[in-house]
Image (tube, rainbow, N blue to C red):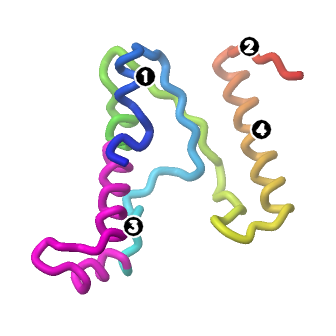
Amino acid sequence: MNNIIGFSNFIEHKAKPIITFRTTVYTNNLVPKSIKSLKTLVCNNGNCPTFIKLVDEYEDAYLKAEAFISSPPKELYVLEIKPQKPLQTTILGSSEQSIVADYKHGFELGMQFINEHKIQAYLQ
């Protein structure tokens, strides 16, 4: 959880470039305000329920990953593939039509990326 995307592995293996695949654009409002306000109600003297601790760890890991992506070490550079519009699918209960639409959008973005960066792709 502390290294959600595994950036230390990229540095250790001297990967250049790092390509990230996004499902959304960056947000600094990762945790809804309702959850944050709940924290003040359910935590007592720094003792919080496990789900609050997990949300805090996830948010911390996400913000660290974002900081790394926006300012990687000098020997690395980061390329991003991310949607141009919000995805139609949701965590639960997405229609087949939404899933197919998001798949097509992702495929188009991937092909654009390959063409822009002159990456040879072997599609079968």
Q: Residue furthest bottom?
A: 41
Residue 72 lies, with reference to residue 39, above or below; the image says: above
Q: Main secondary structure of the magenta part?
A: helix
Look at label 2 and name its amino acid.
Gln
Answer left or right for 121 relative to 41. Answer: right
The first of marks 1 and 2 along the sequence is: 1
Q: Residue at the spot x=49%, y=19% of the render? A: 17
Identify the residue under disc 1: 77
Toward which corner of the image does residue 110 lie, by quadrant? Answer: top right
Identify the residue under disc 4: 108
Q: Residue at the spot x=39%, y=19% of the render? A: 76
Look at label 1 and name its amino acid.
Tyr
Labels 4 & 2 near each other (Cβ < 8 A): no
Which quarter of the figure is the C terminus placed in? top right
Element type at mark 2:
loop
Look at label 3 and name its amino acid.
Val
The first of marks 4 and 3 along the sequence is: 3
Residue 32 lies, with reference to residue 63, above or below; the image says: below
What is the x, y in percent for residue 73? 31, 23
The first of marks 4 and 2 along the sequence is: 4
Look at label 4 and name its amino acid.
Glu
Q: Using the image as rendered, state which of residue 121 and residue 46 is in the foreground.
A: 46
The label shown at residue 120 is 2
The label shown at residue 31 is 3
